[in-house]
Image (spheres, rainbow, N blue to C red):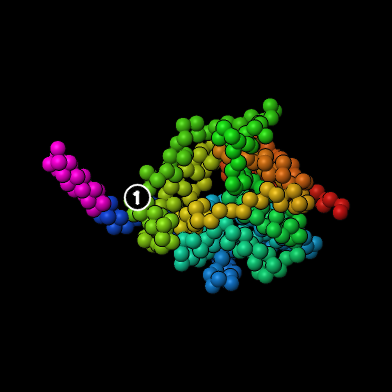
Amino acid sequence: MKAFAKRAFKYFGILLLTGVSVIALLALIPITATVKPIQPTADTHYWSMPGNYRIAYQKVASNNQQKKAPIIFLHGGPGGYIHSSIVKTLAPISNSGRDLYFYDQSGTGLSDRREHPKDTTLHGHVEDLYEIITRQIKAEKVVIIGQSYGAQIATGMAVLHPELVEKLILSSPGDIDPVEFDENGRPRNEIRYPVPANLTFRNIDPNGEARAKQDIDSMPVRAIVSLAIATMFDRKFASDQEVDNTLNTMASRFTEDMVCDRKNVKPEEGGGGMYSRAGSNFYQDSDNPRALMPKMKAPVMVLQGGCDFISYSDAYEYVALYPNARYQFIPDAGHIIWWDKPEAYRANIEKFLSEPLPVK
């Protein structure tokens, strides 16, 4: 019996060593690009941030002499970037007298990659936004449009500095962290905010295929090892460009499930920031903003499409917690609303912005 156990232990050790060796060899294989990395254009400008890094932005300036509070658009992710389609969709709003700013969050797009993965967090994105508003564009008040993860950044700013927010627009907002569950493990939002009978949602990913495309199994071994090392040791194994190549490849597939109609999918433009995605997702828990949200009195509009993979209940929680908020449903639109319905997306925003501010 002892001899058998000894042999079994020996063979297990050999298998383990073989497995580790295979992983080590696969981790040495470079990650190639399937999507051409994003490149700056004549419209690309940079803000120098206090932490000695740059944030890339585009500005659509208004020609209207009647200047109003500027608009800042926050893209989704974490790890997303400013896609040219959102600039094209929202640019006409500048005719109303508002300058528009579109920037790549730290570690994404054309913005600088940070030295360590933990350098990029939700808190850091909120601090960047505060720096941009108060010191870079020097605005007394702004309109913030937060898409998906950008809605979490926008809410972080709104609850900490409500005096800076004229109006808040949250499109396809990600759920408020931390998610709350009841004693049976069911999300409380599903109980509190059931889908109204007059709204029809369509699940465009019933088999979880979009989620599978984002799964770790679909990633190269070198990327998996890199993210594991980043998570445990806050160090980068593969280069930023290599892990960004992975995210860009994944995005070219999972964005197919962010629309109602796949013919509306736009080509990937190669600005993904994988280490930023990892850092913002895993390294630092967000402060629970729920207690502060009722104190933010500025008007809020939540936009959501009928094919959004974010649940109605999670999106509606923002409406329930902000005291001056409303919900706007856009049929036949997915998570990236402006890919399916650009005119409806812009029209709802323009209408909301044209409404007078509440009397204090």
Is residue 317 depicted above or below 228 in this figure?
above
Q: Main secondary structure of the magenta part?
A: helix
The residue located at (46%, 67%) in the rendering is 115
- In this view, which residue lies farthest toward the top? 197
Locate residue 70: give its quadrant: bottom right
Assign the C terminus to one quadrant of the image: bottom right
- In this view, which residue lies farthest toward the front? 2
Q: Nearer the viewer, residue 83 or 319?
A: 319
In the displayed structure image, the side of residue 344 where residue 205 appears, left or right: left
Residue 319: percent from left, percent from top: 71, 42
Residue 316: percent from left, percent from top: 67, 39
Magenta span has 15? Answer: yes
Residue 104: percent from left, percent from top: 56, 60
Query: How many circles with numbers are drawn on the protein?
Result: 1
Magenta span has 332? Answer: no
Q: Nearer the viewer, residue 85 or 240?
A: 240
- Amino acid residing under circle 1: Pro
Is residue 70 depicted above or below 202 in this figure?
below
Assign the N terminus to one quadrant of the image: top left
Q: Which residues are magenta?
A: 1-22
The residue located at (62%, 54%) in the rendering is 287
The residue located at (72%, 41%) in the rendering is 320
Q: Nearer the viewer, residue 232 or 7?
A: 7
The residue located at (30%, 55%) in the rendering is 27
Q: Mark 1: few, some, or many residues within 10 Å (few <14, many ≥20)? A: some
Residue 172: percent from left, percent from top: 62, 44
Residue matched to label 1: 220
Q: Is residue 315 visible?
A: yes
Q: Is residue 98 visible?
A: no
- In this view, which residue lies farthest toward the left? 3
Q: Nearer the viewer, residue 312 or 72?
A: 312
Q: Secondary structure at mark 1?
A: loop
